[in-house]
Image (spheres, grey):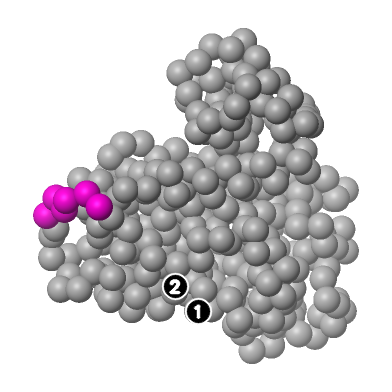
Amino acid sequence: MDLDIRHLRMVCAMAETGSVSGAAARMGMSQPAMSSQLQKVEGVIGGALFVRSRSGLEPTALGREVISRARTVLSEVDTLFGDLRPGTGADEVVGLGCVHLACVASIVAHAGDALPGREVRMRIEPSSTLLADALARGRLDAALIGIMEGFDIPLAPPVVSRALIPRYPIFISLSAAHRLAGREEVALAELEDEFWIAPPGADDGSLAALRASCRAAGFEPKMRYEAPTGGAQPLVAEGHGVRLVDPSWRPSPGTVVLPLTGEPQVARLVVAWRRDRLNDRDAVALYRGIAAAFRQHVDDNPAFAAWWRAHPEVHPLV
């Protein structure tokens, strides 16, 4: 049997829904047919891609590698001829959303260059769920969304998406005076006694993922504070709590941003847009502009820059 695009979509659907039945429903297949196809795919690849746990399907090490590569291939396939199709017209204003990343300001500049003659208005949200909802309701035209591994944020037509970074780790922000601040990386179990700062708004899977990772490390996180990035920084600097952060953030004064040992928190970034608002040519141009903006900030945090250079396989498109 040869693998085809449908097999790649099937494997990614299993990873995103966490179950054979959920993936089967998404793909319009029966559960037995999905299970049979998975066995055939694993036979071709030469190993198990998933194991069953109490929380559902979990990718194996081989599975994570296959899923990462499959998402890269599917991203290219989904926009293979996008910039060759005729445009559908464009409004003068583009509503662009973004999770709170270090590259937000650069995205505005690059998006403006990518869409000359159009005004770009930016909405920054800590919750990807709210950005997806705004896209669905037509309140945004496009957005850069972060999705935690093991969780899914449904995007229904006319919203389509393309992976920007198929897989990258979430880092931890600590006070520069913290006992662990001098480490190259921090084990999650070492933060058992810390108070945590959570982002405000609807949970997009990040809090659930944090709790799951902490429980796997043997403790329940103490969620004492809820604050946006700007409000959280002084709390971290003064040693009142720790928080998860996008790894490309430059450490703010009085803080350090470090990797977590074993990458217990992993996410992916996708660019999503409404096909009834952006024609294919503009969508491709916007994607490339966002990619350039993200790449511009990789070196802001030396720890992330080192990870980035050590893992070229997860950012072939950027």
What residue is shown at x 85% (from left), y 77% (from top)?
Answer: 183
Q: Position of residue 253 (x, y in %)?
A: 64, 89
Residue 25 included in the magenta stretch of the image: no
Dot 1: few (<14), some (14–19), or many (≥20) neighbours within 10 Å? some
Q: Where is residue 187 in the image (x, y as percent from the top left)?
A: 85, 63
Check disc 2 and give the amino acid type. Ala
Range shown magenta: 84-89
Residue 85 included in the magenta stretch of the image: yes
Left or right position of 297 against 116: right
Left or right position of 79 against 304: left
Q: Where is residue 278 in the image (x, y as percent from the top left)?
A: 23, 54
In which quarter of the view is residue 286 placed? bottom left
In the image, farthest residue toward the bottom? 253
- Which disc, if any, is residue 147? none
Residue linked to disc 1: 296
Tell me if residue 8 can be seen. yes
* Viewer-closest of 98 and 309: 309
Marks 1 & 2, CB-CB < 8 Å contact: yes
Residue linked to disc 2: 292
Q: How far apart are marks 1 and 2 (CA)?
A: 6 Å
SS for dot 2? helix
What residue is shown at x 72% (from left), y 75% (from top)?
Answer: 306
* Viewer-closest of 226 and 38: 38
Q: Main secondary structure of the magenta part?
A: loop
In which quarter of the view is residue 52 placed? top right
Left or right position of 49 against 283: right
Q: In which quarter of the image is the N terminus?
A: top right
SS for dot 1? helix
What residue is shown at x 61% (from left), y 81% (from top)?
Answer: 299
Tell me if residue 132 can be seen. no
